[in-house]
Image: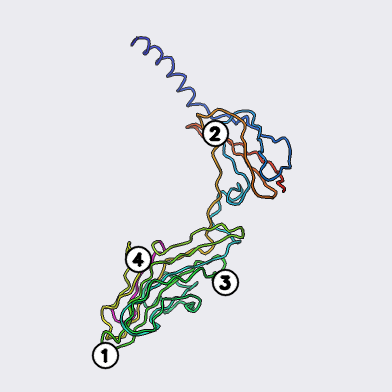
């Protein structure tokens, strides 16, 4: 038995080596449908002929279009921002503001901040109340705020939380503690698809002391993630937490579905469209080995009606 195994192995090895030396052949792949018009809920049968090692399917629906498979930015999105804040302790009001810049030069120093143009957008957001002295207010969400007017074409955007405290005679009369547990910046397409640009953990905050180095922004991995708790409220203070460069038009690439791999047999494919529309359907067929790959792309157009 062992001798037989050795003989078989000796016979198979040259064949395997020969296969590895060959360039992959172009797939002999084609696909058709019986008709070009269907109704919502119909099962569309894609008749597949030929052979390919791998086949991917892009239905042409939002988020599944082959033309957007490499997209990382999009001009047809609207930028939105949702934040949550909480004010606690002490007495002073209006310590916290939210600003943005499109000309900040990545110089995270007081001088770098001063050289940039910062626009205050605090009034667009609902912040935690701070009217009653010494009151610990609950976390307050701003809700979704449309900030699509802020970005400049082909330009990154920066956000900053600015804390300003006035000098005071006592700690109780001083600046409040502010927490920012949520910073959710995202894009929304016309059809409602959402792409996260940054959140409170990934925005890359850096703290910058402008006045009173005892007080600093705290950036941590657990809730509240970003907060300012004055260590000394008797002196005037100005401190910034500035984000990294963010791409306001960031978008997720569209993705297809793998309908065949090496182990699956070639067979017809069925799909159901649940929305009316004209769809460009794409099949990507590949033959792949360690010498490279050969690809064929087949495109079909169908209409789905009520």
Residue placed most toward the observer, 14 or 285: 285
Residue 117 visible, this orientation: no
Residue depicted at 62% across the width and 44% down the height:
59
Tell me the distance, in whole angstroms, between the alpha carbons under discs 3 and 4: 28 Å
Question: Residue tagged by mark 2?
Answer: 260
Q: Is residue 56 left or right of residue 160?
A: right
**Element assignment for label 2:** strand
Front position among marks 1 and 2: 1
Where is residue 215? Give x, y as percent.
Answer: 29, 77
Q: Residue furthest bottom?
A: 169
Residue placed most toward the observer, 242 or 92: 92
Residue 81 visible, this orientation: yes
Is 52 above or below relative to 242? above
Marks 1 and 2 in Cβ contact (< 8 Å)? no
Front position among marks 3 and 1: 1
Q: Is residue 188 left or right of residue 236?
A: right
Question: Residue tagged by mark 3?
Answer: 149
Crowding at mark 4 (Cα within 10 Å: few <14, some 14-19, many 20+): some
Where is residue 293? Give x, y as percent.
Answer: 54, 35
Which of disc 3 and disc 2 is earlier in sequence?
3
Where is residue 229? Give x, y as percent.
Answer: 30, 75
Tell me the distance, in whole angstroms, between the alpha carbons under discs 1 and 2: 73 Å
Residue 168 drawn in magenta: no
Which of disc 2 and disc 4 is earlier in sequence?
4
Point out the stretch of residues depicted in magenta: 202-213
Marker disc for residue 169: 1
Residue depicted at 66% across the width and 35% down the height:
45
Residue placed most toward the observer, 115 or 47: 47
Question: Residue tagged by mark 4?
Answer: 225
């Amino acid at each position: 038995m062992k001798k037989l195994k050795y003989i078989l192995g000796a016979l198979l090895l040259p064949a395997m080596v020969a296969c590895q030396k060959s360039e992959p052949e172009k797939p002999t792949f084609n696909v058709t449908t019986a008709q070009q018009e269907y109704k919502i809920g119909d099962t569309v049968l894609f008749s597949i002929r030929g052979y390919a090692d791998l086949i991917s399917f892009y239905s042409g629906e939002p988020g599944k279009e082959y033309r957007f498979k490499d997209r990382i930015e999009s001009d047809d999105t609207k930028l939105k921002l949702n934040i949550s804040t909480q004010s606690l302790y002490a007495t002073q009001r209006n310590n916290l503001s939210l600003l943005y810049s499109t000309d900040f030069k990545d110089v995270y120093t007081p001088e770098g901040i001063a050289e940039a143009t910062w626009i205050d957008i605090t009034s667009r957001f609902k912040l935690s109340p701070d009217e009653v002295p010494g009151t610990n207010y609950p976390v307050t969400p701003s809700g979704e705020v449309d900030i699509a007017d802020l970005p400049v074409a082909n330009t990154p955007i920066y956000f900053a939380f600015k804390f300003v405290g006035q000098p005071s005679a006592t700690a109780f009369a001083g600046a409040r503690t502010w927490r920012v547990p949520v910073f959710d910046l995202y894009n929304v397409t016309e059809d409602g698809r959402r792409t996260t640009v940054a959140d409170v953990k990934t925005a890359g905050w850096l703290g910058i002391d402008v006045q009173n180095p005892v007080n600093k922004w705290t950036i941590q991995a657990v809730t509240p993630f970003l907060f300012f708790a004055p260590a000394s409220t008797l002196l005037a203070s100005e401190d910034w937490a500035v984000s990294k460069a963010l791409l306001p038009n960031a978008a997720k690439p569209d993705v297809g579905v793998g309908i065949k791999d090496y182990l699956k047999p070639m067979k017809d494919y069925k799909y159901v469209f649940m929305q009316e529309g004209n769809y460009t359907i794409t099949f990507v067929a590949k033959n792949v080995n360690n010498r490279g790959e050969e690809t064929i792309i087949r495109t079909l157009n169908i209409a789905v009606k009520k």
